[in-house]
């Protein structure tokens, strides 16, 4: 399933306002949809955990701030070559494309 990462992060922020009630949050989402293949529930859990860790790390900070910025990224050949093992392991385990990176 394809999901928009910007939307996922915004939903996490909207669903957990009490977690960030004493933290200033700045978001700068790019204008393009950042669409990836994945499960929206699992991605929400990942971003929720990241933001909870950031919140915990700022617990003793006088003026806590979290900045979130998104921008498009297209994997070039060099990136794919350096990360082929990770891609292969993931693809093989999900059997989505026979272990070939795209």
Image (spheres, rainbow, N blue to C red):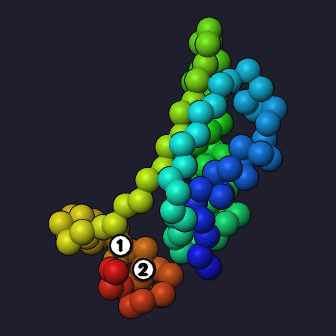
**Quadrant hosting residue 27:** top right
25 relative to 75 in the view: left or right? right
Farthest-out residue, top: 62
Q: Which residue is mark 1?
A: 87
Left-right relation of 60 to 75: right
Which quadrant of the rendered structure holds the C terminus? bottom left
Number of on-image labels: 2
| Secondary structure at numbered mark 1 | helix
Residue shown at 43% from the left, 74% from the top:
90
Is 54 situated above or below 8? above
Residue beneath disc 2: 91
| Side of 88 relative to 47 (left or right) | left
**Badges 1 and 2: C-beta atoms under 8 Å apart?**
yes
Q: CA distance from mark 1 to mark 2?
A: 6 Å
Q: Residue at x 35, y 72 (%)?
A: 87
Q: Position of residue 19 (x, y in %)?
A: 76, 32
Q: Give the residue drawn at x 68%, y 24%.
A: 23
In the image, 74 versus 99, the foreground residue is 74
- Residue 53 is situated, as x and y percent measured from the top left of the image, at 59, 34
Quarter location, residue 44: bottom right
Q: Quarter of the image holding residue 97?
A: bottom left
Numbered circle sitting on residue 3: none
């Amino acid at each position: 399933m394809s999901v928009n990462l910007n939307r996922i992060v915004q939903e996490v922020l909207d669903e957990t306002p009490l977690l960030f009630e004493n933290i200033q949050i700045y978001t700068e989402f790019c204008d393009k949809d950042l669409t990836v293949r994945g499960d929206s529930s699992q991605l929400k859990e990942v971003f929720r955990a990241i933001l909870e860790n950031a919140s915990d790390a700022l617990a003793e900070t006088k003026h806590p701030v979290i900045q979130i910025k998104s921008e498009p990224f297209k994997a070039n050949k060099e990136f794919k070559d350096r990360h082929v093992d990770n891609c292969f392991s993931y693809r093989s385990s999900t059997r989505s494309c026979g272990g070939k990176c795209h």
